[in-house]
Image (spheres, rainbow, N blue to C red):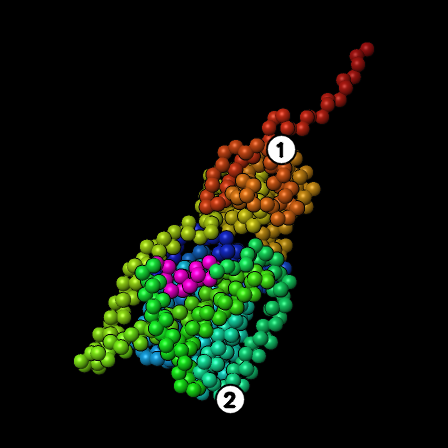
């Protein structure tokens, strides 16, 4: 997992969410604290953590290194779970399967909190298993509580653990210990939940998930390529035969299946009322899928061992066969992993946009960002916009406690544009083409003035972002004021 995470880590550009992590992480602690009162409180702990990381060296590779390390830790924790719940070779297979899954590799290379949340949730699951077997519950509650503060949707892990206890037919003492730990986690998360609820406009762009959404998540959990998907699905179904073990005993499938299924399903159902679902929010649920698949592989290995002449002598060969099968899976999915290292595989590439702006814009030029979120390009790569006038901006992002800065009102934006004969626009391509409506009055004012009073000239398009020069036609330029009358000569 570490090797796959480091491979191609320097993509040469950040996409919009990584850029937010980068520019917020480089602010001072008081500036980050001020921002969290307005927006993005759900990522507050992560931003403060990044502030310390980026103080070592500000750069996109350093930004992503915590995610790489977290993904490697998660793979090790999945292996530890498989070993504890079944046997060492099951842990080996489960950990390797997690490592070669493209979804794990994708988020291992993102400067966001999701890989760290996955590590925390998987670690909490391992502590959960230990507590069920007679250990203490407070380490479980402490780690899960901290993980929920990294991202509040990790609290859905409690549903998975409750289902595992039900499948194990746990006794009253175990339920009581888990209930106390779960209650502490929920109570500790309430302040975050209340603040983030007031900032829910951030996710207003989300839509309710459909059955296609669920099918896509199943695909990425078990393998995006057809061959790997079919084999893993078959082994997972075989692994479900061991879903329930002896009374009071949690099994590999009994932990893995609820972990993989219940958090995503719960979030999808809640999103039918208020859309909140994005697959990265439940990345931590991926840890359950390799456990179920490895349990199925172990059951298949057991069937093969029964027909063998010398079953014990065959055990090392069975382990090696599983490892070779996973190596074959890696080779089969290698094109997917390779493509994922391309910056074009992300929603956008702000570095490519900044390179275009650096070639086209000159000091003194005017620029408009449409929508305001695209000012992220200038905040992340300021060199390309050095000396350029930001027409709509009235207060910078860090100073105003916002993600992208504070802009003037619609009337003032219209007046500022009225004084210009040419302006560069960095805009969403769909918005400029009329396929997406501006969301607020300021955006509508920018769009209306550009369409009504200017003509688009040369443009460059990079990953859905357009850099276009707008020029006011001569006929639309305001007439110069009349000259004062000349004094008469006597």
Q: Does residue 448 sit above or below 313 in this rendering?
A: above
x, y percentage for residue 441? 66, 46
For the point 59% across and 33% down, which residue is it?
Answer: 454
Q: Which residue lies at the image location 58% right of the left edge and 42% below the top edge?
A: 368
Q: Nearer the viewer, residue 394 or 128?
A: 128
What residue did someone put label 1 on?
453
Percent across and percent down for residue 268 are 52, 64
Residue 430 makes an appearance in the image:
yes
222 sits to left or right of 465: left
In magenta segment, residue 218: yes
Judge by depth and name the residue closer to the eye, 294 or 472: 294
Question: Percent from the top left, x then y, of residue 194?
Answer: 63, 68
Image quarter where the N terminus lies is bottom left
Which label's residue is closer to the chain start, 1 or 2? 2
Nearer the observer: mark 1 or 2; the answer is 2
Residue at the spot x=28%, y=64% of the render? 327
Give the main secondary structure, helix, strand or loop, of the magenta stretch. Answer: helix
Magenta residue span = 212-225
The foreground one among 151 and 352 is 151
Residue 453 colored in magenta in the image: no
Q: Which residue is label 2 attached to?
A: 173
Label 1 with label 2: CB-CB less than 8 Å? no
Disc 1 element = helix
Q: Helix, strand or loop at disc 2?
A: helix
Mark 2 neighbour class, 10 Å CA radius: few under 14, some 14 to 19, many 20 or more: few
Q: Dot 1: within a 10 Å radius of its alpha carbon, few (fewer than 14), some, or many (20 or more) residues?
A: some
């Amino acid at each position: 997992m570490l090797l796959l995470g480091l491979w191609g880590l320097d993509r040469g550009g950040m996409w919009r969410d990584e850029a937010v992590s980068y520019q917020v992480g480089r602010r001072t602690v008081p500036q980050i604290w001020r921002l969290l009162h307005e927006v993005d409180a759900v990522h507050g702990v992560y931003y403060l953590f990044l502030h310390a990381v980026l103080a070592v060296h500000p750069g996109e590779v350093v930004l992503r290194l915590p995610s790489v390390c977290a993904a490697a830790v998660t793979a090790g924790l999945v292996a530890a779970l498989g070993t504890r719940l079944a046997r060492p070779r099951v842990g080996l297979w489960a950990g390797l399967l997690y490592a070669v899954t493209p979804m794990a590799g994708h988020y291992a290379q993102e400067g966001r909190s999701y890989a760290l949340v996955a590590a925390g949730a998987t670690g909490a699951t391992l502590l959960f298993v230990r507590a069920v077997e007679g250990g203490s519950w407070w380490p479980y509650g402490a780690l899960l509580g901290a993980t929920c503060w990294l991202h509040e949707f990790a609290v859905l892990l409690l549903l998975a653990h409750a289902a595992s206890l039900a499948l194990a037919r746990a006794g009253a003492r175990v339920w009581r210990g888990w209930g106390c730990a779960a209650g502490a986690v929920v109570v500790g998360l309430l302040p975050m939940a209340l603040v983030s609820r007031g900032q829910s406009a951030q996710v207003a762009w989300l839509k309710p998930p459909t059955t296609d959404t669920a099918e896509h998540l199943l695909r990425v959990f078990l393998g995006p390529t057809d061959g790997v998907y079919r084999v893993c699905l078959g082994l997972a179904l075989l692994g479900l035969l061991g879903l329930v073990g002896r009374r009071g005993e949690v099994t590999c499938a009994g932990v893995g299946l609820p972990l993989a299924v219940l958090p995503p399903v719960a979030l999808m159902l809640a999103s039918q009322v208020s859309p909140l679902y994005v697959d990265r929010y439940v990345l931590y649920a991926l840890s359950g899928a390799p456990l179920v698949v490895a349990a199925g592989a172990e059951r298949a290995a057991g069937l093969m061992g029964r027909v063998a002449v010398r079953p014990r002598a065959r055990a090392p060969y069975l382990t090696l066969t599983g490892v070779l099968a996973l190596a074959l899976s890696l080779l089969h999915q290698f094109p997917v992993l390779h493509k994922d290292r391309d910056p074009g595989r992300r929603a956008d590439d702000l570095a490519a946009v900044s390179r275009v702006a650096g070639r086209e814009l000159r000091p003194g030029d005017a620029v408009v960002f449409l929508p305001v979120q695209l000012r992220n390009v200038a905040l992340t790569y300021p060199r390309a916009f050095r000396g350029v006038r930001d027409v709509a901006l009235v207060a910078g992002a860090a100073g105003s406690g916002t993600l992208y800065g504070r802009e003037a009102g619609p009337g003032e934006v219209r007046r500022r544009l009225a004084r210009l004969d040419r302006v560069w626009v960095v805009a969403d391509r769909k918005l400029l083409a009329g396929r997406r409506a501006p969301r607020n009055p300021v955006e509508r004012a920018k769009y209306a003035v550009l369409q009504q009073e200017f003509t688009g000239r040369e443009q460059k398009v990079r990953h859905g972002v357009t850099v276009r020069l707008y020029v006011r036609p001569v006929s639309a330029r305001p007439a110069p004021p009349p000259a004062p009358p000349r004094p008469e000569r006597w």
